């Protein structure tokens, strides 16, 4: 880990580093089927990408007494059982978490940011025990300095809680001159950043609805992956203080 003062970039996972909607949506569909509830339409299914799954289940009318069951069903399909066809290996099956791809150009941008002396960490509302093997599988783990997510017991589920956890684990200290930036594609990233006193750089290639990132306070939104490193460098060069 580099010494302070550090320039820390916290990176969301789903919709920022990976196109993860196939596996998330497939797992959500199975969850609603097992709960005996009508499956939401496509636009609502895409809204499951970003927030903690229990938040989205509540938004879709799942009764409070069924939330825990729904979360367990979702986690089973997403991370525990090989229930879905593997598009890269016909005839084989994989869990939902592997039904994803890394956005083109992301590895190059992460390498470039490291070369510029930035400290990188994944900060996701996906449970940490799920996020780690996803990053391992897609070759992201060696490209970052840490991977932080929600807790298995749901005591840490919001983006603000995850950001706070990541900063604590990284030994982030503003008194030593450390500064941090959140990078993400949904309102959860923007809200979590603002709640923890950080700015949020919005990623327009992810799963945000039109105007979502701007309306939730992102200081800037970039549309292309190849703008990421330059935008991060520009932020730390031009924004001298945190909120």
Image (spheres, rainbow, N blue to C red):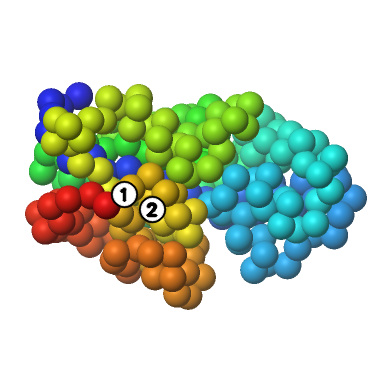
Instruction: Name the residue located 65 percent from the left edge and 46 percent from the top edge.
Output: 53
Instruction: Name the residue located 68 percent from the left edge and 44 percent from the top edge.
Output: 54
Q: Position of residue 159 (x, y in %)?
A: 48, 44
Residue carrying label 1: 198
Q: Position of residue 175 (x, y in %)?
A: 17, 32
Left or right: residue 158 versus residue 181 is: right
Instruction: Name the residue located 38 percent from the left edge and 64 percent from the top edge.
Output: 217
Structural distance between the alpha carbons of marks 1 and 2: 5 Å
Left or right: residue 175 versus residue 23 is: left
Left or right: residue 128 versus residue 56 is: left
Q: Nearer the viewer, residue 185 or 130?
A: 185
Q: Quadrant of residue 90?
A: top right
Image height of 141 relative to 61, above or below:
above
Residue 86 in view in this figure: no
Instruction: Name the residue located 45 percent from the left edge and 37 percent from the top edge.
Output: 162
Residue 231 in view in this figure: yes
CB-based contact (under 8 Å), mark 1 and mark 2: yes
Image height of 69 relative to 27, above or below:
above
Residue carrying label 2: 194
Callout 2 crowding tier (Cα within 10 Å): few <14, some 14–19, many ≥20: some
Q: Give the SS element for disc 1.
A: loop
Callout 1 crowding tier (Cα within 10 Å): few <14, some 14–19, many ≥20: many
Q: Position of residue 44 (x, y in %)?
A: 67, 64
């Amino acid at each position: 880990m580099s010494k302070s003062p550090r320039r820390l970039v916290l990176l969301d996972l789903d919709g920022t580093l990976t196109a993860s909607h196939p596996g998330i949506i497939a797992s959500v569909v199975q969850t609603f089927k097992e709960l005996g509830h009508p499956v939401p339409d496509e636009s609502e299914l895409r809204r499951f990408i970003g927030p903690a799954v229990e938040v989205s289940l509540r938004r879709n009318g799942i009764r409070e007494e069924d939330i825990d069951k729904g979360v367990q069903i979702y986690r089973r399909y997403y991370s525990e059982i090989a229930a879905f066809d593997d598009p890269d290996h016909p005839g084989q099956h994989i869990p939902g978490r592997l039904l994803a791809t890394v956005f083109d150009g992301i590895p190059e941008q992460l390498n470039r940011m490291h070369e510029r002396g930035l400290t990188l960490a994944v900060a996701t509302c996906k449970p940490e025990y799920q996020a780690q093997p996803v990053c391992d599988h897609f070759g992201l783990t060696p490209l970052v300095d840490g991977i932080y997510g929600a807790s298995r017991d749901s005591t840490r589920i919001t983006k603000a809680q995850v950001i706070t956890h990541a900063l604590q684990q990284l030994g982030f200290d503003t008194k030593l001159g450390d500064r941090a930036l959140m990078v993400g594609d949904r309102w959860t990233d923007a809200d979590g950043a603002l709640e923890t006193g950080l700015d949020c750089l919005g990623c327009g290639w992810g799963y945000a609805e039109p105007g979502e990132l701007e309306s939730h306070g992102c200081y800037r939104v970039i549309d292309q992956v190849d703008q990421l490193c330059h935008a991060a460098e520009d932020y730390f060069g031009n924004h001298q203080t945190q909120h």
